[in-house]
Image (cartoon, helix red, strand yellow):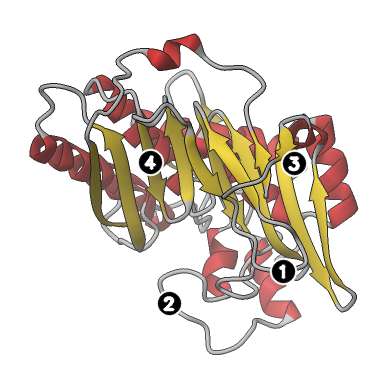
Amino acid sequence: MRLAVPLEIDPGALSGWKPGAPVVDLRGETMGTTWHVRLAQPPGLHVNSLRQAIEQRLEAILAQMSHWREDSLLGGFNRAAAGTWLALPADFATVWEAALSVGEASGGAFDAAAGRLVNLWGFGPTPAAQAPDHDTIGQSLRHVGAHRLAYDAQTRRLRQPGGVHLDFSGIAKGFAVDALGELLTQSNCYHALVEIGGELLGLGLRPDGDPWWVDLETPTSESAPLRIALHQMAVATSGDYVRGRHTIDPRTGAAVPHMLSLSVLHRSAMMADAWATALTVLPPLEMQRLATRKRLTVRALAGDEQGVAEWISPALERMMVDAVID
């Protein structure tokens, strides 16, 4: 078993840690998937009240960012007339600005204004009967791209140029994980593991003093398992091994076939989510160069007719140790 552990321990992560504290599991559904919070229960915590707060926080995020709900703020923007300016709430603006940042850094491999393509390929609310042809993709590309939207960062206003559709599916789950982590710490829960649809955030330590261990998704026997100590850290995974070929290059509109699974570790689940999406779009060598240049912590599994090749970024390699696990 290979392990990856943080190079430094955050002394602040010991705040409120109590050996033998009871562990509480909370679960539910959101964003077309499930959420799960496992926490070391601090004294005086009302578990039912926390559950209600979690559900309310997730509902508020969905009301803003869901591309499955016509009544969401995002849905309203997508239907807005050309020239309409939308004042963005703080959550929406945070996600949009992060999307712009990763989109620019990745050369457009990540684009939250590619909703037209998502819908065209049937990866949105309505499945497609068949893959789109070249001409149809070309027509949709005329309404794709964050560069087509004007954004006033001072007033947090976004302008709809007409026909451009936002889609936050490559970043919203990560944001929601971060939001629940913040909610937990505000509730004096400093030691917890948060998960939404496979995106995870580890806060503090388990009651036994261990970090929150998680195994990276490894859908092939050709690569050895890798277990991560999520200590004040998040991990997000993208790839085609679960849902099949469903990653789209927003620059060309084509589906991307080459990445089996790619995981990114980051302090922010939102940034891990966005970077995992962006890097999955890029050809392997280009992905490796960008991840190395940006000092991203990445494990990638790329498959072809010759088998599966694993790539470990230098940042992750420095964290890795070999261990015998009973």
Residue 194 numbered mark, or none: 4
- Where disc 2 sits, the SS reads loop
Disc 3 and disc 4 in contact, CB within 8 angstroms: no
- Where disc 3 sits, the SS reads loop
> Cα distance, mark 2 to mark 3?
28 Å
Does residue 252 appear in this view? yes
Disc 1 or disc 4, which is closer to the eye? Answer: 1
The residue wearing badge 3 is 106
Relative side of 100 to 168, left or right: right
Residue closer to the observer: 208 or 241: 208
The residue wearing badge 2 is 126
Disc 1 or disc 3, which is closer to the eye? Answer: 1
> Cα distance, mark 1 to mark 4?
27 Å
Which comes before the other along the chain, label 1 or label 2? 2
Quadrant of residue 246 within the rendered picture? bottom right
> Cα distance, mark 4 to mark 2?
29 Å
The percent coordinates of residue 323 (x first, y second) are 68, 41
Residue closer to the observer: 315 or 182: 315
The percent coordinates of residue 210 (x first, y second) are 46, 31
Q: Residues within 10 Å of mark 3 (few under 14, many from 20)?
A: many
The residue wearing badge 1 is 221
